[in-house]
Amino acid sequence: MAVRYDEIGVSYNQTRKADPYLTKRLIHLLQPVEDGAYLDIGCGTGNYTIEMAKRGYPFIGMDPSIQMLTQAKQKYPKMEWSLGKAENTGIHSGEMDGVVATLTLHHWDNLTEGFLEMERILKPKGKMVIFTSIPEQMKGYWLNHYFPNMMEASCKQMPTYESITDALKSAGFSIGHTEKYFVRPDLEDLFLYSGKQRPHRYLNVEFRQGISSFTMLSNAKEVTQGLKELHEDIVSGKVHDVIDAYDNESGDYLFMVACKS
């Protein structure tokens, strides 16, 4: 997975950046302190890591992709960036006060091993804040209408809510809080469903290049056909009917707060 992210890392930062609202929620849920120690696991190019560090919270950004970390270091060289993965961080036991995991769980090699490692490096009562999407939510994306095979593959790679909670509990965590996130029109981090209210975004190749579903899980023929149909529906206005048909209350993404016992 690191190699594949090295491939898309070149253009990743053109469309992906820390969204102000999501940053605010991450900080609110983590409740970091200025003399603490925190890890952003699967930090990518460090967008959220940097924003939280700029607010005075000591963070380490860790990712298995050298390409991603190279960009992170170039943007913010004065903080610590580390090559590593969730299952093997190399951090001393009980060193961290908190962990943030943003849109990364589906890239871990092993969910249970990853949470066991997070539990190991956290201090007693340490907190982990997760931002992810679960298959039940992704099945409600209107993208399924235009890219069904890609979305099926995307759903399959996402851990279910039950698998996440089971793995957390087996690793010694308790679930402290869950919170649905519905994509807002002003979302600045252009991940998979960031075009929920702005379907024209998917017609932009640079936008799609920053999304792993399009770069890693899609079929070129389906994407070409789906984009053609999407463009036609945008012109005719039919896309609004498609979007309305997928309206639901499941949330588009999910915040989860896990606490070490």
Image (tube, rainbow, N blue to C red):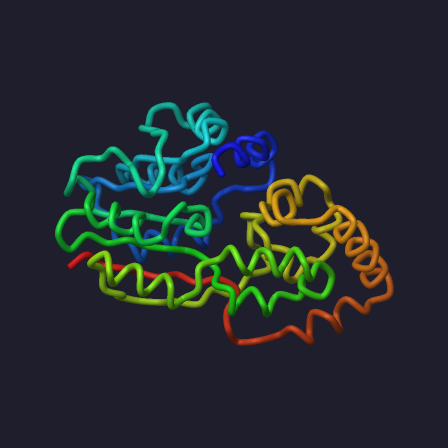
Q: Quadrant of residue 91?
A: top left
Observer-nearest residue: 174 or 34? 174
Picture coordinates of residue 101, whole percent (x, y) = 37, 49
Please give the name of the residue rendered at 75% of the width and 73% of the height, measured from the top-left corner.
241
Observer-nearest residue: 84 or 57? 84
Look at the picture and state if 99 lies above or below 183.
above
- In the displayed structure image, the side of residue 165 where residue 107 appears, left or right: right
- In the displayed structure image, the side of residue 160 where residue 152 appears, left or right: right
Please give the name of the residue rendered at 60% of the width and 36% of the height, measured from the top-left corner.
14
Observer-nearest residue: 7 or 200? 7
Q: Quadrant of residue 87?
A: top left
Q: Quadrant of residue 58?
A: top left
Picture coordinates of residue 165, whole percent (x, y) = 32, 64
Look at the picture and state if 9 lies above or below 229.
above
Picture coordinates of residue 195, whole percent (x, y) = 64, 56
Observer-nearest residue: 226 or 204? 226
Please give the name of the residue rendered at 53% of the width and 31% of the height, measured from the top-left corner.
6
Please give the name of the residue rendered at 21% of the width and 41% of the height, measured from the top-left corner.
34
Can you say which quadrant of the picture contains the C terminus? bottom left
Furthest residue in direction left, as rendered: 124
Picture coordinates of residue 95, whole percent (x, y) = 17, 39
Look at the picture and state if 250 lies above or below 195.
below
- In the displayed structure image, the side of residue 138 where residue 33 appears, left or right: left
Q: Total label count?
A: 0
